Amino acid sequence: MSRKKFIIITIIVLIINYLLDFITKQYAITHLKGNAPVYYLYDTIMIYYIENSGAFLSMGSNWPIAVKYILLAALPIAFCLYGIYYCLVKEKNVTRIILFATIIAGGLGNLVDRLLNDFKVVDFLNFGIGNLRTGILNVADLSVTFGAIILVIYEFRQSKKNKLSVADE
């Protein structure tokens, strides 16, 4: 496959993931902000607007602003930029490109929120059964989480295939 096709795949995956996150956050701001939680599927899914001023599960929300800029903005920006570069220039496996771009787009979705909204990220999804629930999150968080999980599974399977092919030789 040509490098041009890898670039197109990277850009498409980044745009789709970012736009899904952006559109759902705009919907949350417009339709959920200030309203009571809404429950679906016997309370398995809760939709509720909240602004998270930290990272995962509000970690870092009380950090000094200089620390926030370094750990919640500068470092993630550097990782995202390097990840985009890696997908566009280095990586030659389409599956990895799709998964890396999915993870990166999720990171970018929350980074843009942080940088444009005084370090606040819009969250609105909560999943669980009874008292066993996730934190409140958004589509960007889902992109990062599922992209990373699928990447780990993919890499595990690839390493097993490689070990089997070496053993066959």
Image (cartoon, rainbow, N blue to C red):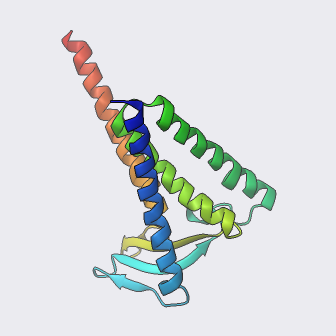
Q: Is 49 rendered above or below residue 93?
A: below
Q: Which residue: 70% across, 49% down?
A: 74
Task: Tell how many labels.
Answer: 0
Viewer can see residue 35: yes
In the picture, measured across the screen, residue 40 lies left or right of residue 68, that is left
Q: Position of residue 69 (x, y in %)?
A: 74, 55
Q: Residue at x 39, y 53 (%)?
A: 146
Q: For this rendering, which residue is in front, 131 or 82?
A: 82
Q: Is residue 84 left or right of residue 116?
A: left
Q: Position of residue 47 (x, y in %)?
A: 43, 79
* Figure quadrant of the N terminus: top left
- Identify the residue at the far top of this view: 169
Q: Is residue 13 left or right of residue 25?
A: left
Q: Position of residue 151 (x, y in %)?
A: 38, 42
- Residue 84, compared with residue 67, is above or below; it is above
Extreme residue toward the left, this view? 168
Screen quadrant of the C terminus: top left
Question: From what the image shows, is residue 126 above or below residue 12?
Answer: below
Q: Please state the horizontal and vertical placement of residue 3, each as a whole percent of the image.
A: 41, 31
| Residue 137 appears anywhere in the view | no
Q: Is residue 123 above or below residue 72?
A: below
Q: Residue at x 43, y 65 (%)?
A: 20
